[in-house]
Amino acid sequence: MHVAALLPAYQAEAHLGPVLARLARVHPAADTLVVDDGSQDATRAIAERAGVRVHAFAANRGKGRALLEGFRLLGDYDGVVTLDADGQHPPECLPEFVRAAEAGADIALGVRARVGTMPAIRRLANGAASGWASWLAGQTVGDSQCGYRLYRRRVLERTPITPGRYEVETEIVVRAARLGFRVVTVPIPTVYADETSHIRTMHDVPRIFGVLARLTLEGAMPPAAMRRAARTAATP
């Protein structure tokens, strides 16, 4: 399976170099793309020195648009693994996502094993969003806001997505599941140390719930099986 790694990056100079060095041990640099989302620091230069492919926006456009541009540029791959550039997603786990896809997954979705270390407000929002997304999808979406995931090419080609910011990741998995694509989970450890999340709680979280509300209005109310999946996903 020919897979690319896609890292949307914004102001990531503090962590990007080590992340790319670790990634290179398990994945070829030639098959890695960094989309610099209008950074004003050395993010682009660090990526270029690492020998990976680089695409840079002139101004910040949001993670969702960085992802969609990366998917477009990586159209000749069988699948795309997305992971954050700030060190919260261990690059060493990438082969586990590939194995999940080779075993039949259309989307391999990372589920963070240490959500208890996440800031409380984000933990509550993530649990609620994951439960709602599972209810809509009819499959368990254990961690709807985890950006570490693998998408098969057919998912990216057939799933209609509205350009946006962080809410794009939620929309992709719900729409793909509704189209019949299989979602599986891959447990991952997550580090919350000095990394600064670019999710703006008072701005991006309402957008995430907004897209879930829109998806609810678009489809019929899910059956009892979906409600059971939602309760499972929302359980800490």
Image (spheres, rainbow, N blue to C red):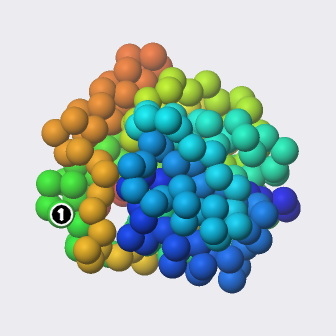
Q: Which quarter of the figure is the C terminus placed in?
A: bottom left
Residue located 54% across and 66% down the image: 46
Q: Residue at 78% across / 41% down in the picture?
A: 75
Mark 1 neighbour class, 10 Å CA radius: few under 14, some 14 to 19, many 20 or more: few
Whether residue 46 is visible here, answered yes or no, is yes
Expressed as whole percent of the image width and height from the top left, the position of residue 183 reads 60, 51
Pick the front one: 122 or 34? 34
Q: Considering only vertical position in the picture, is 103 above or below 230?
A: below
Of residue 182 and residue 46, the one placed in the foreground of this image is: 46
Question: Can you give x and y, in whole percent of width and height, for residue 192 in the image?
Answer: 29, 73
Q: Is residue 3 above or below residue 204?
A: below
Left or right of residue 83: residue 207: left
Task: Find residue 103 and report its horizontal and vertical position in percent.
Answer: 76, 65
- Residue 223 shown left or right of residue 151 in the figure: left
Residue drawn at (52%, 73%), measured in percent from left and top? 17
Location of residue 99 by image quarter: bottom right
Label count reads 1
Q: Amino acid at mark 1?
A: Pro
Residue at 50 percent of width and 27 percent of height: 163
Residue 75 horizontal side relative to residue 230, left or right: right
Residue 134 x %, y %: 43, 44
Residue 184 in view in this figure: no
Q: Which residue is mark 1?
A: 119
In the structure shown, which secondary structural element does the residue marked by tag 1 occupy? loop
Picture layout, residue 123 above or below residue 223:
below
Of the 4 image quadrants, the one containing the N terminus is bottom right
